[in-house]
Amino acid sequence: MLQLEIGDRTFTAELHEDRAPASVEAVREFLPLESELMHVRWSGIATWINIDEIDLPEIPRENHTVYPSRGDLLLYPGYRNEQEILVPCGPTCFKSPAGELAGNHFATIDATAEELKAIEELTLREGVQDVVIREVTE
């Protein structure tokens, strides 16, 4: 299980080891992650974490999607664009200047639609927010 601290809010997320094993393994290698959560530029009602500075192993496409559901965490290992973790907070089509992107759905946040929308609105109105992601035991 993951724990995400976004500003003064804390959420948990279920890892999908059975559907995205290589992605989950890669994420575990760089945790804990202290970074910034930003509003997306191209994808809709979502936020993202740039992880371009992390040296990721080669990760296959697994459990990948262009149209994630609210709360689906996607790992994008940088096939055609920068590496990132996408955090959809509402209707999202994962895109970049390179076009549509398919990210690996490796975890799902346990949060209400209202909580996720509040995070997206916070990044839209106030800018980047501190984020910490770590693995925790249940």
Image (cartoon, rainbow, N blue to C red):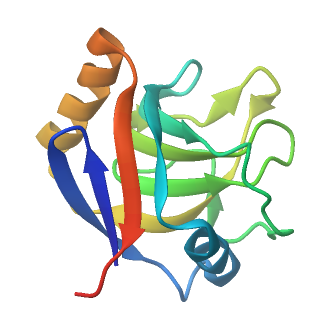
Residue at position x 67%, y 73% in the image: 26
Q: Position of residue 81 (x, y in %)?
A: 80, 36
Q: Horizontal placement of 1 versus 64: left or right?
A: left
- Residues 48 and 45: in front is 48
Q: Is residue 20 above or below residue 114?
A: below
- Residues 77 and 68: in front is 77
Image quarter of residue 60: bottom right
Q: Position of residue 13 (x, y in %)?
A: 32, 67
Image quarter of residue 130: top left
Q: Is residue 87 above or below residue 134?
A: above
Q: Is residue 117 above or below residue 6?
A: above
- Residues 93 and 40: in front is 40
Q: Position of residue 91 (x, y in %)?
A: 39, 34
Confirm whether residue 132 shows in the render: yes
Confirm whether residue 89 shows in the render: no
- Residues 72 and 75: in front is 75
